[in-house]
């Protein structure tokens, strides 16, 4: 399996309004380093799994509506607790749409799996990974 992984980041505010989250129930900020990996079983005639430029710009476009936002106020997260895992799945779903609509170019058709990893800090991270 081949993979290309690209990175960006988002700065968000949110609260996690359930007792299990302790002090994180209150409004707080977070900066997530976001890694997106695109997996293919083969390479194209140029030796590429995925166009890194298209992968980078696509990830940036998907993250832009989240950056500097209070996730508690966004319709896309209504009725959801915006845990790291929930945010990962949202980004994964958006990347899947981008792949299926050709935003990663001709090579995007070979993508068979995506992993979205959110680094919360140097000590904690979460991800969502699945076949597409």
Image (cartoon, rainbow, N blue to C red):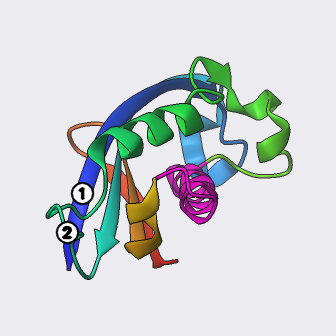
**First to last magenta residue range:** 83-104
Dominant SS of magenta comes to: helix
Q: Residue at x 49, y 41 (%)?
A: 58
Q: Mark 1 points at which residue?
A: 4
Q: In this view, does 112 lie above or below 96?
A: below
Side of 31 where 52 appears, left or right: left
Mark 2, Cα crowd under 10 Å, few <14 / some 14-19 / many 20+, is few
Q: Position of residue 91 (x, y in %)?
A: 56, 51
Q: Where is residue 4 in the image (x, y as percent from the top left)?
A: 24, 57
For the residue pair 34 and 105, the one nearer the viewer reads as: 105
Side of 114 where 16 appears, left or right: right
Q: Residue at x 46, y 71 (%)?
A: 109
Q: Residue at x 60, y 65 (%)?
A: 100
Residue 74, picture quadrant: top right
Q: Judging from the image, what secondary structure is the residue with disc 2 in? A: loop
- Can residue 72 be seen here? The reply is yes
Q: Where is residue 98 in the image (x, y as percent from the top left)?
A: 58, 54
User: Magenta includes 45?
Assistant: no
* Cα gap from disc 2 to disc 1, whole angstroms: 16 Å
Q: Where is residue 125 in the image (x, y as percent from the top left)?
A: 33, 51
Q: Mark 2 points at which residue?
A: 45
């Amino acid at each position: 399996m081949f993979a290309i992984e690209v990175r960006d980041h988002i700065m968000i505010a949110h609260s996690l309004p359930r007792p299990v989250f302790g002090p994180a129930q209150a409004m707080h900020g977070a900066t997530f380093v976001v890694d997106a990996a695109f997996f293919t079983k083969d390479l194209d005639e140029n030796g590429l799994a995925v166009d890194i430029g298209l992968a980078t710009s696509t990830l940036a476009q998907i993250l832009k509506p989240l950056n500097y936002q209070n996730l508690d106020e966004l319709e896309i997260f209504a009725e959801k607790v915006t845990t790291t895992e929930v945010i990962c799945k949202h980004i994964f779903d958006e990347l899947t749409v981008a792949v299926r609509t050709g935003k990663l170019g001709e090579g995007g058709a070979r993508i068979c799996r995506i992993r979205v990893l959110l680094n919360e800090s140097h000590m904690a991270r979460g991800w969502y990974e699945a076949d597409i």
